[in-house]
Image (tube, coloured by chain):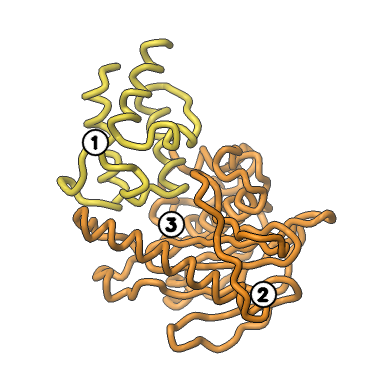
Amino acid sequence: MTSGAPGLLASSDRRGRTFGAVDGLRWCFGEWMPRAADPLGTGRSLGPRGDERAHRLLARRATGRAWAEDLVRDVLDGAWPGFRPDRPGRKPALDGDHGLDVSIAHSGPVMLVAVAVGVPVGADVEDAPFEAFARPQLVRRMCSSAELEVFASVPDGSIRRRALARAWTVKEATLKARGTGLAEDPRTVEVDAEAILADVVSGPGDDEQRAKPELSIVRLSATGAELRHPLA
Amino acid sequence: MTTDAPTIESWLMGRVVAYGKVDAGTFDAATPLADLGLDSVYALTLCGDIEDEFDLDVDPTIVWDHPTIGELAEGISERLAAA
């Protein structure tokens, strides 16, 4: 898997979204739901009751699709082909024969949407502080034995959790780009665990860095997979 | 180890609450797992938890085949009984 540059980032729009683009790929990232709706500021849901929960899920779905529409219209000079009917367990697909692929990801209040021209794309985001990645039940189901060995070299804490979250976003984005999702075992999607861990360890480690989500976008082509971390 | 569906159902509800996505008492066994915010990370975590609790190896796709806690409990119960 090759690594691409983060790409050009436009200034945020009035909805607080940040846009990025490289040749044949566009994405936007931001908060689909204000963090004010999340009093702990952790990105965790506080367990809303049923009606509120259903409303929030519908709003999240509508927002993801609206952001995707904005990106697609930008690529297609204003045209909007619409989405195909939902396919359970599969990522959203655009109608028509224009060669665009879309991927929508969300975690807590943050959302990442990517659109690629001519090749499959997968996007994934995990919001800090990555509490789920402290669970050994998850770690052993997502990592190969070689990856487990690397991540076991550091104790549980913010560095290990961020490294695991980054590894997960790469795996999940790859599975989305392949169109398989969790029907394919994520342990079989190899990541460079040593490089990920080294990069996280060398980061600034300040409060701003600790609050950053992890984002990955993977594009597949005949020459292989291209990985991009938009916030890197 | 229990193999009866109601006990498994209760255990599953406890796991969903432990993941911090929803509060106890705001859902029941008929609520779709997707409505509980059970994303890929938690589907995979749940597989690991099922493995630990019941010594049963399951794929994350089990939550698509059994989309509510009640149906998932029945599915696990049947697999345990057949093991």
Q: Which residue is mark 1?
A: B29
Q: How far is mark 2 from mark 1, CA to CA?
A: 44 Å
- What count of labels does the image hold? 3
Chain orange in the figure, letter: A
User: Picture coordinates of residue A16 (x, y %)?
Assistant: 45, 83
Q: Which residue is mark 3?
A: A157
When the figure is inspected, residue A154 is found, relative to residue A199, above or below; the finding is above
Q: Residue furthest right?
A: A223
Image-quadrant location for residue A59: bottom left
The image quadrant that residue A36 belongs to is bottom left
From this viewpoint, is residue B48 visible?
A: yes
Q: Is residue A232 shown to the viewer in this render?
A: no
User: Which of the two residues, A70 or B75, is positioned nearer the viewer here?
Assistant: A70
Nearer to us in this view, A152 or B2: B2
| Residue A97 versus residue B47 in the image, above or below | below
Q: CA distance from mark 1 to mark 3?
A: 34 Å
- In the image, taking residue A74 as reference, residue A23 lies left or right, namely right
> In terms of depth relative to the viewer, which is nearer, B76 or A70?
A70
Amino acid type, callout 1: Ala
Q: Which residue is mark 2?
A: A6
The quadrant of the rendering that contains the N terminus of chain B is top left
Q: CA distance from mark 2 to mark 3?
A: 26 Å
From what the image shows, is residue A80 above or below residue A104?
below
Q: Nearer the viewer, mark 2 or mark 1?
A: 1
Please provide percent x and percent y for residue A31.
42, 74
Asked if the residue under mark 3 is in contact with the one under mark 1, i.e. CB atoms within 8 Å, the reply is no
Please report, as a chain letter, where disc 1 is located. Answer: B
Which residue shows up at 50% across the image and 32% down it? Answer: B59
